[in-house]
Image: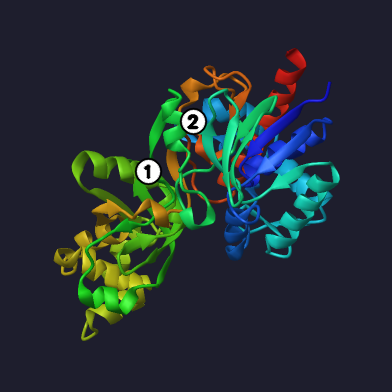
Amino acid sequence: MSVTVAIIGGGPAGLMAAEALARRGIAVDLYDSMPSLGRKFLMAGKSGLNLTHAEPVDRFLSRFGTARPYLENAIEHFPPNAVREWALALGTKTFVGTSGHVFPKSMKAAPLLRAWIRELRARGVSVHVRHEWVGWDDVGGLAFATPEGKKNVKADATILALGGASWPQLGSDASWVPYMKKAGIAVQPFEPANCGFNITWSDHFKERFAGEPVKAVALTTDDVRLNGECVVTEYGIEGSGVYQHARALREAIEEKGEAVLRLDLMPDVSLDKVITRLSKPRGSKSFSNHLKKTVFLSGVKANLLRECAPDRLDDVERLAEAIKSLPIKLTGARPIEEAISSAGGVAFEALDEGFMLTSKPGTFCTGEMLNWEAPTGGYLLNACMALGRSCGVAADSYLKSR
């Protein structure tokens, strides 16, 4: 007797689940609420499509914090090198950037996505767009809202890959949460993860430096120090270096009403050397020229000192300490609609080891709709694909065990 799996969500997790099942000869119906598949995948590709990261697997796994135990098995079965091999099989060659990030050589997402969808269709995956999942019907089947009206579907197994709550214009809007809660499934509230933060800049600083990158710095929160970069914005600060600390910053703001992010503006120079350089006679040089000649700070970095440590500029040691650990007060996270990804989602405690809902046998959850988060840098995308693949394998095992 033939069996069918319904996969709801056409992002990376859903597509990878469909691939895993189709390769095992299972008939797959793939549903998505949007007019086309992989819209967030394509948007991520506008900045180069960071597929994964080339660092060792153990360090890679450390990026997932408290969610690591839940994700470890899935990622170990689809680690960074497997992602690169998978892309190559679809005709996309990749390269490792200077910081370890892995990109397609074309730096584009569209060719890879097109090849992926062609492969899935060739393996018999049936795609249904403009199908918005609206929960379960009275007999436990799947209910969809479509342009032709309500539609009910019965499947032998279901994989929900419905996304998180960021970028709602691309379909990741968490509209599925009420249906899960109605079914008694625990869902942790969504919060912005890879997001910018608000800072009360002076009008002068904001007008001059909004949009300016702050490169070659080290960013520290709660004694966690990471090299990176960030960008000054009109509302505050954003960028990959900030995203790595997003969880700690968000939690500090929730607890104390504000958070402090510390920037080392000269991460490769010791405090003693900075003091020595600043101690050179200033003579008739202005403060700006002295800073530029002795420690090579100018532009946005020099003005960050004026903005965030104005009381330390006339004392060499205190100025040096500010250069090495400049405190920047953050007053709030930006709205989740602006975030690259979200934290929160279906609690792992509601799932078994194969990501199947314990209260709904045969229904699996995967991707960003689960309660985990990670910084940008290839970690999100690799994990979503690994989770999707894992769910596909688990669904196949479930069907065989029936």
32 or 62: nearer the viewer:
32
Q: Which residue is mark 2?
A: 67
Q: Does residue 312 appear left or right of residue 391 in this picture?
A: left
Residue 185 in view in this figure? yes
Which mark lies nearer to you, 2 or 1?
1
Farthest residue toward the front?
A: 149
Q: Residue at x 58, y 64 (%)?
A: 47
Q: Residue at x 69, y 41 (%)?
A: 30
Q: Does residue 337 appear left or right of residue 22 in this picture?
A: left
Say which element carries label 2: helix
Mark 2–mark 1 CB contact (< 8 Å): no
Quadrant that contains the N terminus: top right
340 or 51: nearer the viewer:
340
Q: Quadrant of residue 301?
A: bottom left
Q: Residue at x 60, y 28 (%)?
A: 141
Residue 271 in view in this figure? no
Say which element carries label 1: strand
Residue 216 locus on image (x, y percent): 45, 62
Residue 51 locus on image (x, y percent): 65, 51
Q: Earlier in the sequence, mark 2 or mark 1?
A: 2
Q: Residue at x 61, y 43 (%)?
A: 9
Farthest residue toward the top?
A: 402
- The vertical placement of 58 against 213, above or below, is above
Residue 261 locus on image (x, y percent): 30, 52
- The vertical placement of 104 against 166, above or below, is below
Three-letter amino acid code at the position of disc 2: Ala
* Callout 2 crowding tier (Cα within 10 Å): few <14, some 14–19, many ≥20: some
Q: Which residue is mark 1?
A: 191
Three-letter amino acid code at the position of disc 1: Glu
* Callout 1 crowding tier (Cα within 10 Å): few <14, some 14–19, many ≥20: many
